[in-house]
Amino acid sequence: MFFKKSVLITFSFFLSVGFAESQKTIQKNQVQLIENSIIDIKASNVRKNRDHYTIDIFADNIDKSIAGIQFDLIGEDFTVIEVNGGLAESAGFNFYNGAKGVILAFSLEGKTISASKLKTPLLVLKVQKNIKGSAELNFKTLIAGERGVKLDSKFKPIVIR
């Protein structure tokens, strides 16, 4: 009787340890899935012109269609002069940029940017730097999917010299 009881207790212990380890693995995988579902937005291919910079804005990790884009410029080191091009223009999006650095892009006809792994810019910015020396370009992002569902996104700041 003692032997059966100790085997049962030992077996129960190993089951609970195995279950706990399985739960840790599941939680780790869920965190990884959440991190992987964030749309990473970054600036690349910065080109200096006489009085402004032209910058390609890329979005990585797009796994859902994009129906709308809003960027809010953080800080006052830059002024947005113009927004156009990229996947957003190809999809028929209209562009709007406000005096305070708010950028909007969406289609009045309900068109979307398809989920994509293409290495094509999401859009192209023309900005003017308002200070001498280095400055960090950073945006607060809001990306909308179909039916206006918010898609998690983040902008990776870039220092422009």
Image: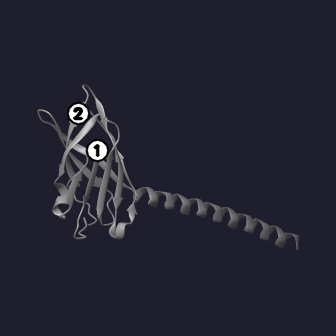
Image quarter (top left, top right, bottom left or bottom right) of the C terminus: top left
Asked whether 92 or 114 is in front, the reply is 92
Inspect the image, locate mark 1, and give the three-letter code of the amino acid beneath it: Gly
Q: Secondary structure at mark 2?
A: strand
Q: Is residue 102 above or below residue 30?
A: above
76 left or right of 15 in image: left
- Asked if labels 1 and 2 touch by Cβ distance under 8 angstroms, the answer is no
Asked where in the image residue 50 lies, by quadrant, the reply is top left
The circle drawn on residue 129 is 2
99 left or right of 13 in image: left
Q: Residues within 10 Å of mark 1 (few under 14, many from 20)?
A: some
Asked whether 47 or 18 is in front, the reply is 47
Image quarter (top left, top right, bottom left or bottom right) of the N terminus: bottom right
Question: Residue at label 1?
Answer: 101
Quick check: can you spot residue 119? no
Inspect the image, locate mark 2, and give the three-letter code of the amino acid beneath it: Lys
- Identity of the residue drawn at 31% across and 60% down: 62
Q: Secondary structure at mark 1?
A: loop
Distance from the alpha carbon under mark 2 to that under mark 1: 12 Å
Residue 129 coordinates in the image, percent (x, y): 23, 33
Instruction: Return the residue found at the far top.
Output: 132
- Identity of the residue drawn at 45% across and 61% down: 33
37 left or right of 20 in image: left
Quick check: can you spot residue 85? yes
Q: Is residue 156 above or below residue 61?
A: above
Instruction: Return the residue found at the far right.
Output: 1
Instruction: Return the residue found at the far front.
Output: 99
42 left or right of 31 in image: left
Residue 103 coordinates in the image, percent (x, y): 27, 51
Residue 78 coordinates in the image, percent (x, y): 26, 36
Asked whether 25 or 136 is in front, the reply is 136
